[in-house]
Amino acid sequence: MTGSAPLPAPLDEGRVRARIALLPTLPPLVMELLGSFQQEDLNVTALAERIGNEQTLAARVLRIANSPFYGLSGRVASIHDAVVILGFRAVRSLVLAAAMVGAFPTQLGRHFSPRTFWRHSVATALAARGLARLRGENPETAFSAGLLHDLGRVFLAVAFPDHFAALLRWQTEHDRPNREAEQAVLGLDHGTAGRLLAEQWGLPAPIGEAIARHHEPDREPTSPLVDLVHGADLIALALELDGRENSAVPPPSPGAWARLDLDQVSLISLFGEVDENFQETCHALLP
């Protein structure tokens, strides 16, 4: 378009990796929890005590543990209680969620709204958790993957603000979907950036795969977790709980939607469940 500002030089994976290396490291407790995914002989009591000593994270975990999200009506008074009642995996998922949200700035200028971003992420996490229960998959892993599915997008906004501003200008001028605009302007999409960040931070491989492929769930080899996050992302867009109106909801990938095998009653029930738990979960997790 005549008069448009010139586009910055495209990014590549090497440049993205170099920028990721400059990010602040995650807190030691978070790194320990990430490592615990690979351990079979966990000292759960010691880890619970460590979590309890991190006051901000512990407070967020207890807020969500006592919210309608779990339906426990104030029974959880400590991290130890949370581990006993919810299980260590659930508590670990909540701690990691709160830590990841806290790893990024709450203000990113006029080009990006962290509040809108994380509200969509929370809605996707809730939908992924509900879908996982329906499909017999791990709901806590699905919740984490749903919350972090667009991790690459917030990273690009933080790490490459000039590129991100150019991306949004180009997208406004050409009226194209996010991923198409990202490829045109940046040379890679937020799924690729998110995968690289997930690898650097040591996120479990299935979560990294869901981050990378939630827009391409039918690409071989298929994955139940990728299917869950793909479907959850569409449900979150349809519900518009992030505050954006008239969000474009792309059609689901045929194979993934068939594998999810959702009947109308289950889908309507899931919409209601996400809507019901959304505000309390945002209050518990978001700054």
Image (cartoon, helix red, strand yellow):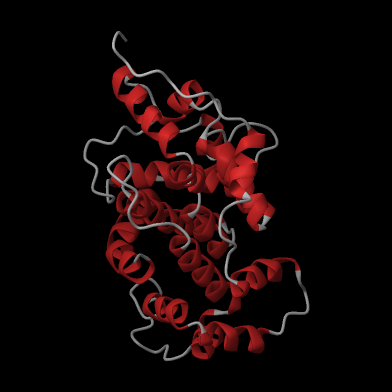
In the image, residue 172 above or below residue 133: above
The image quadrant that residue 10 belongs to is: top right
Quadrant location of the N terminus in the rendered image: top left
Q: Is residue 104 left or right of residue 248?
A: right
Q: Residue at (55%, 87%) from the top-left corner?
A: 84
The C terminus - image quarter: bottom left
Q: Position of residue 181 (x, y in %)?
A: 43, 25
Q: Determine the residue positioned at 55% across, 82% down.
A: 51
Where is residue 37? Give x, y as percent. 69, 67
**Nearer-the-camera pick, 52 or 104:** 104
Asked whether residue 168 is in view, the answer is yes
Give the farthest residue toward the top: 2
In the visual, does 285 lie left or right of 150?
Answer: left
Q: Which of 245/193 is in front?
A: 193
Task: Give above or below for 82 relative to 24.
Answer: below
The residue located at (34%, 56%) in the rendering is 269
Describe residue 202's horizontal placement relative to residue 170 as left or right. Answer: right
Where residue 284 appears, x then y in whole percent? 35, 71
Q: Is residue 213 visible?
A: no
Q: What count of labels does the image hold?
A: 0
* Towards the viewer: 94 or 67: 94
- On screen, residue 8 versus residue 221, left or right, reads left
In the rendered image, residue 68, in percent from the top left (x then y), is placed at 33, 74
Query: Looking at the rendering, which quadrant does residue 285 occupy?
Result: bottom left
